[in-house]
Image: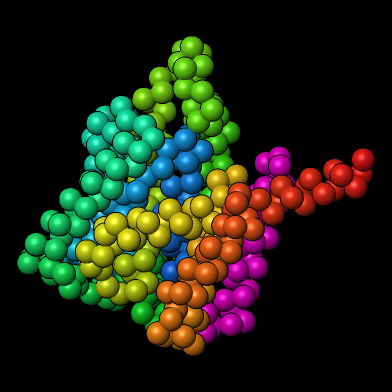
């Protein structure tokens, strides 16, 4: 898909989500939370395109949430743009430092090391009484350029999160068209050939890792603002595992499907909890199993199937 068609599609989808949120205000909160998680998953998908799977995306998701929470709760900073900006700076700095260690590893070693780093943060947050321990703390009275978001300001919150989600998609698309973005995809296929081209595989991994951390931190900050609360569970392995599940469901072939998969998972979990409170995990598990069984390439595979069908009919 060329750039013009891609940007037109993004604009249409953005308007469609905004219209759905306006027409059905009851689902605004679910839409906004799903989009914030989709940002973290988008960062994970960009790493998957380089052949890397992080089981520690919750590390930067929690850093984003806690940065917003600490600044608003302890230092009375209530402007979301400042909170998110601080989260981006902190996550970028930490990711740059960690990337020099993590870039030397691949496959399961990379996955386990990222998981270990996330669990270290989880342990620190749980043991820190100053940060609320296992209970965390509330995030209240947040505004974005003077417009209240979070809490009961559901539609304005959705518009802000939607704006960041669209920005994340556009930034990821532009990066994927750069030399480093194309080399990252080559890294997944054959790292040795990438090195023969004169590029540094470690540098590509570091860039992918830092970019993924920034997207996760933005998603975490937005999630904390939306929910009005942050706690150590944001860094727990189950949160990182959820991001991996969403990434698998969406597939790595598209930059849009991570958000679609996050929406599907969030709605299924919400309504399964509401109508089957004692068996919602079973319902969710069956649906995920069915999606993986019938869509092994994720939701992105639907587009490939349709394209293949058109080619077959045309032949």
Q: Residue 113, can we see it?
A: yes
- Which span is picked out in magenta? 1-28
Q: Position of residue 112 (x, y in %)?
A: 29, 43
Question: In the rendered view of the protein, which quadrant contains the C terminus?
Answer: top right
Question: In the rendered view of the protein, which quadrant contains the N terminus?
Answer: top right
Does residue 101 sit above or below 247 in this rendering?
above
Does residue 132 sit above or below 105 in this rendering?
below
Q: Position of residue 189 (x, y in %)?
A: 54, 27
**Residue 211: quadrant of the picture:** top left
Q: Nearer the viewer, residue 211 or 191?
A: 191
Q: Nearer the viewer, residue 146 or 138?
A: 138
Q: Residue at x 48, y 46 (%)?
A: 45
Q: Is 134 a magenta residue? A: no
Q: Position of residue 89 (x, y in %)?
A: 28, 46
Query: What is the magenta segment's predominant secondary structure?
Result: helix
Q: Position of residue 157 (x, y in %)?
A: 44, 72
Q: Residue at x 67, y 41 (%)?
A: 3
Q: Residue at x 39, y 35 (%)?
A: 107
Q: Nearer the viewer, residue 113 or 132?
A: 113
Q: Nearer the viewer, residue 232 or 94?
A: 232
**Residue 166: quadrant of the picture:** bottom right
Does residue 147 sit above or below 297 in this rendering?
below
Q: Residue 299, can we see it?
A: no
From the viewer's perspective, is 139 left or right of 271?
left
From the viewer's perspective, is 175 left or right of 53?
right
Q: Is 27 a magenta residue? A: yes
Task: Give the farthest residue toward the bottom.
Answer: 275
């Amino acid at each position: 898909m060329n750039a013009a068609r891609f940007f037109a599609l993004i604009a249409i989808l953005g308007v469609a989500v905004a219209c759905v949120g306006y027409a059905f205000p009851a689902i605004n909160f679910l839409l906004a939370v799903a989009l914030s998680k989709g940002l973290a998953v988008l960062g994970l998908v960009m790493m998957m395109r380089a052949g890397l799977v992080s089981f520690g995306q919750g590390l930067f998701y929690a850093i984003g949430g806690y940065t917003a929470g600490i600044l608003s709760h302890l230092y009375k900073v209530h402007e979301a743009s400042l909170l998110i900006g601080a989260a981006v700076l902190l996550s970028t700095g930490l990711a740059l430092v960690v990337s020099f260690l993590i870039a030397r590893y691949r496959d399961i070693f990379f996955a386990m090391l990222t998981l270990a780093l996330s669990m270290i943060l989880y342990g620190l947050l749980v043991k820190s009484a100053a940060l609320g321990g296992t209970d965390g703390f509330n995030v209240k009275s947040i505004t974005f350029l003077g417009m209240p978001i979070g809490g009961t300001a559901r539609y304005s919150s959705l518009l802000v999160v939607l704006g960041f989600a669209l920005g994340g998609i556009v930034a990821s698309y532009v990066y994927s068209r750069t030399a480093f973005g194309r080399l990252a995809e080559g890294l997944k296929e054959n790292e040795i050939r990438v090195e023969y081209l004169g590029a540094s595989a470690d540098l590509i991994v570091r860039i992918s890792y830092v970019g993924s951390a920034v997207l996760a931190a933005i998603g975490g900050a937005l999630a904390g603002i939306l929910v009005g609360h942050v706690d150590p569970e944001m860094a727990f392995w189950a949160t990182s595992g959820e991001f991996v599940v969403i990434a698998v469901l969406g597939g790595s072939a598209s930059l849009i499907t991570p958000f679609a998969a996050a929406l599907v998972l969030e709605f299924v979990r919400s309504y399964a909890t509401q109508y089957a409170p004692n068996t919602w995990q079973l319902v969710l598990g069956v649906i995920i199993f069915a999606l993986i069984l019938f869509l092994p390439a994720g939701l992105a595979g639907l587009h490939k199937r349709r394209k293949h069908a058109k080619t077959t009919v045309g032949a």
